[in-house]
């Protein structure tokens, strides 16, 4: 699988701006709206990327981690404002899931948002695994 040719580093972060990150994304992103309990309650819209396309710029000391169920997914939150801007997902432990709602506004970035059935995660998670793989 090859990486999109039009990757651009884009900024984002939490509400209080204590946590800031950059993520390399193409001009058009397919993101997932998951219906599992934590994503539904927090309004998280996923853009999953390989680890090499994510950089934490500031706020490592302001992040706390929440683990539940299997404890594999590392749900990270800002200790100051409580916003979950990104996390290491159970489906893609080799990558990062960015909350597209936490990206800085960009006029040249388009999203296609597709539903993901996280309530039945075991049956569907394999369909996300390719999103965090590096290009061949």
Image: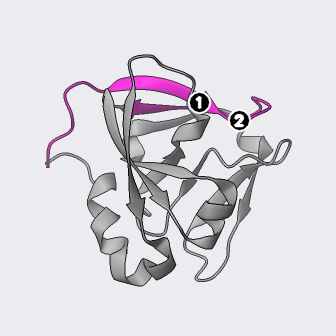
In this figure, which residue is indicated by the disc labeled 2? Answer: 19
User: How far from the left and from the top, in percent, is residue 82?
Assistant: 80, 48
Q: Residue at x 31, y 64 (%)?
A: 129
Placement of 98 over or under 103, stated as above or below: below
In this figure, which residue is indicated by the disc labeled 1? Answer: 12
Marks 1/2: CA–CA distance: 8 Å
Mark in front: 1 vs 2:
1
Report the magenta residues as a range.
1-24
Q: Is residue 16 part of the magenta span, yes or no?
A: yes
Q: Earlier in the sequence, mark 1 or mark 2?
A: 1
Q: Quadrant of residue 5?
A: top left
Q: Residue at x 48, y 72 (%)?
A: 118
Please give the count of numbered marks on the rendered protein: 2
Determine if residue 69 is in view. yes
Residue at the right extreme, as displayed: 80
Q: Quadrant of residue 60?
A: top right
Q: Residue at x 63, y 44 (%)?
A: 85
Kindly check if marks 1 and 2 are in contact, taking CB atoms under 8 A apart as contact: no
């Amino acid at each position: 699988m090859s990486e999109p040719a039009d990757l651009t580093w884009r900024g984002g972060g939490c509400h209080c701006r204590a946590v800031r990150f950059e993520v390399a994304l193409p001009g058009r992103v397919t993101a997932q709206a998951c219906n599992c309990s934590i994503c539904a309650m927090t309004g998280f819209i996923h853009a999953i990327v390989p680890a090499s396309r994510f950089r934490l710029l500031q706020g490592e000391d302001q992040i706390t981690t929440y683990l539940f169920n299997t404890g594999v997914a590392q749900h990270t939150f800002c200790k100051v404002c409580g916003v979950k801007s990104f996390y290491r997902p159970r489906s893609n432990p080799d990558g990062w899931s960015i909350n597209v709602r936490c990206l800085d506004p960009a006029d040249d970035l388009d999203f296609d948002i597709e539903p993901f059935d996280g309530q039945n995660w075991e049956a569907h998670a394999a369909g996300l695994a390719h999103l965090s793989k590096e290009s061949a």
